[in-house]
Image (cartoon, rainbow, N blue to C red):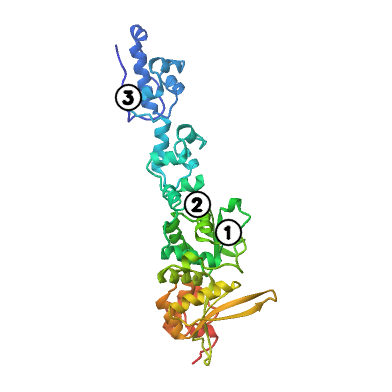
Amino acid sequence: MRSVSVSPAMTGAPQEGYFEEPTYSDMNNGAFTRQKILDAAIRLGKKANNQEIAEFAGLKSRRTVNYYFHSKKDLFFEIGTAFENPVEKLINAAKALPPKASAREIAEKAGYKSHKIINCYFASIRALKEASETFESNVDEISKVYPEVAFSEQDVSRGVQIPTEITPAVAEEIGWHIGDGSMPNNSTQHRTYQLSGDKSEEKEFYDLYVRKAFKKIYNTDLKIGYKSRKRAYGFTLSSKAVTDYKTKVIGLPIGEKSRTITIPPRIMNGDINIKRAVVRGIADTDFSFMFGKAHKKIHYYPRISGSTASPKLAYQLKTILTQLGLKPNVTHQIRKKKFLEYSVRMCGEAQLEKWMNKIGINNPKHMTKYLVWKKFGFCPPKTNIKQRKQLLMGLLDPYSLYGEKNA
């Protein structure tokens, strides 16, 4: 018998006269047909279906392929090419993607049109990720520590993690929530948390610092961008686990919070490092660092202030700041003839320096003002973060921002 061998390196469409014309005895020999099928499969590769392989081999029906080889998998196994089954394909796809890949992304990577294929071979997306060793969520641990916290299937798939203890990083993030965060009461089962700030002054703070912190605390990759028709900059996080943790463990409120928000007992009862961290978080998102003229023509006199409609929060802040050695003053006034607004204020160089030593700043919006003041002894008013960076790099004269030189 004359058999035909095709090199795996050969590619392209079949050429005329590719297969040798068989003799009469060859035509009646099943080994010859079997060899033609093998050669065609090698040439076309495992993406080809049985009909394409049959036609390439000069056969009329794909049934001939099934006659000599029980399945396409058996065909490619014989020529030394492993043919993945659905379980293997899904596991390999999950391994090839980041751990936070969704069921839809994994199914698509595996070559399937619907993510429902996963449920056909695995009990859940979690089971698939455990099989592929890409499962990251600490849902099992949290169910023992905080049984009141529930994880959605999406939380489990994305690898969301909940902290098991209050660390300074967690306390600082709670401070951001107190300052500028919210959990709308119209969200589905209260699964949404929002945080946003000034669209130009705080973009760097969100892109660099906030993003990194949420990754560290909740193992969550935030999608940060412009919000409310580009009037603000921040994110909306949909997570049952995170909002359950914030409400049921920490004790933060759902819905309107301006007049009732307080620093939760878990923070107020923490050590001094926890307290300083929550104050830093609140200040980074909701305080003002300004410089007044006082008795000079330039703005040299530091003023740190934060305003809130919650009297309890104001006096909690005063308590912590006093414990840290600062001298805060709390005042109140009627705002828009509707409600009392409470202000926590500290003034003077000594207070600012003590703040920096005891608490610190992580928001570039505030830090650049402090650094300009340290460099020049004053900080011009109504500057933006770009101008302050130019001042620090020596690309802009601070006196030019006054319109004339001041002594």
* One can see residue 18 in this view: no
Amino acid type of the residue tagged 3 in the rendering: Ile
In the rendering, at what x and y percent does residue 95 appear? 38, 42
Give the mark, 3 or 2, whose residue is nearer the N terminus: 3
In the rendering, at what x and y percent does residue 251 appear? 53, 61
Residues at badges 3 and 2 in contact (C-beta under 8 Å)? no
Q: Is residue 231 above or below residue 369?
A: above
Q: Is residue 66 above or below residue 85?
A: above
Amino acid type of the residue tagged 1 in the rendering: Met
Q: Quadrant of the N terminus?
A: top left
Q: Is residue 82 above or below residue 159?
A: above
For residue 79, which numbered disc appears in the image? Answer: 3
Q: Nearer the viewer, mark 3 or mark 2?
A: 2
Disc 1 to disc 3, how far (Cα)?
A: 59 Å
Q: Which one is nearer the viewer's eye here, 318 or 375?
A: 318
Name the residue at 44% across, 22% down. Answer: 50
Disc 1 to disc 2, how far (Cα)?
A: 16 Å
Identify the secondary structure beneath mark 2.
loop
For residue 183, which numbered disc appears in the image? Answer: 1
For residue 149, which numbered disc appears in the image? Answer: 2
Q: Nearer the viewer, mark 1 or mark 2?
A: 2
